[in-house]
Amino acid sequence: MDMIFYAFAVLLFAAIILLVEGAFLWWNGTHGGEAQRIARRLRLMSGVAHGAGERVSILKQRHFSKNERLDALLHRLRPAHAIDRLLLQAGVKWTVSQFAGCSLGLGALGLMLAEPWPMPPPARAVIVAMWFAIPYVLARRARTARLTKIEEQLPEAADFLARALRAGHSFTNVLQMVGAELPDPLAGEFRAAHQEINYGVPMNEALHNLAERIPLTDLRYLVIAVVIQRESGGNLAEILGNISHIIRERLKLLAQVRVLSAEGRMSAWILSLLPFVVMAVMSLANIAYISMLWTDPTGIRLMWYGAGMILFGVFWLRRLIHIHV
């Protein structure tokens, strides 16, 4: 009986030891330092931003409004952070409260303009939504233009970094030189990264923040190359030179794709604008003939069907001519 008790005690002790070791290995594999570093690299590769709890920053927090209470309220809302990130990437100086106020004002203006016209509630809602989305559309266009310009500047920046590293400068000094020598908007982002490092932010975190502010795949490759080189060693100047060559070849391929898809894009514009042009010409030629479309209930129904088909066709053509390189 004693032997059975002792054997049970030994097996229980071994089971507890194995359970503790298994729990430690699980925690280290999912929440340990190496796992977090791998997760950050995967997020950079996939374009997913860091969570608020993982971001290390001692810089002054961006204000969402000049009013302190409204600023505190907006900081609790997740959509406000997304809007602020959009404005930051677009390079505009609006605050989130100004953006929201402009959107609400334009939405109210659209409602006032649509009120006198007899139309069903869904049509009025669509008109108000279109006016409400004008600031967002303008911010998206500014963001796209700015990111395109930064992407065109990246090969030159990578070559500049490689030449400066070959000359013997440290990487921190190279960031300062890029911010001083190259034109904006890319130079401003490198200056911000250099200032974060000077204020005490670790270099890896500053580079991750740079990749978050500029969501470009080519820049993420550059940041990942620098981070891996700092951890494992290697010839960073040669790596940056290779990345510069890859970016130039990709931009060249993108230009060729744009040339080959120019006919499709022109066809999409013509097919999208043709119904409105024909309707305007017919209105000038015989307004009584075309007015049946908005005076007769059947005509109104046909116009709604036609608008839906045009919208579907625009999105379909956009997907066909948008080729990701």
Image (spheres, rainbow, N blue to C red):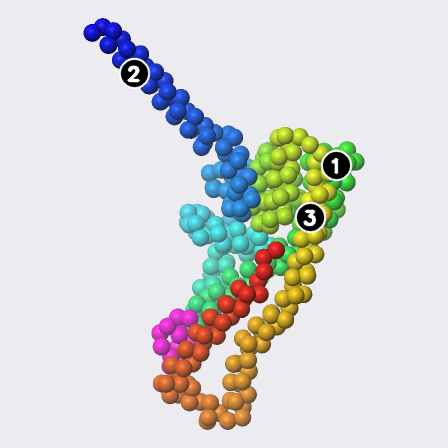
Where residue 72 is drawn, which disc sits there? none
Residue 242 visible in the snapshot: yes
Query: Circle 1 sits in a helix, a strand or a loop, which is it?
Result: helix
Taking depth in this image into account, of 231 and 86 the one nearest to the observer is 231
Instruction: Locate residue 269: give its quadrant.
Output: bottom right
Residue 121 falls inside the magenta stretch: yes
Callout 1 amino acid? Leu
Crowding around mark 2 (Cα neighbors within 10 Å: few <14, some 14 to 19, many 20+) is few
Instruction: Answer with left or right where residue 185 lies relative to residue 1.
Output: right
Residue 66 visible in the snapshot: no
> If you read the primary sequence from the N terminus, does the residue marked by circle 3 or circle 1 appear first?
1
Instruction: Answer with left or right where residue 9 lies relative to residue 298.
Output: left
Which residue is located at x 44 percent, y 89 percent?
291
The residue that mark 2 highlights is 12
Instruction: Locate residue 15: give its quadrant.
Output: top left
The residue that mark 1 highlights is 165
Q: Position of residue 198 (x, y in %)?
A: 64, 35
Which residue is located at x 46 percent, y 89 percent?
290
Callout 2 amino acid? Leu
Which residue is located at x 35 percent, y 74 percent?
121
The residue that mark 3 highlights is 246
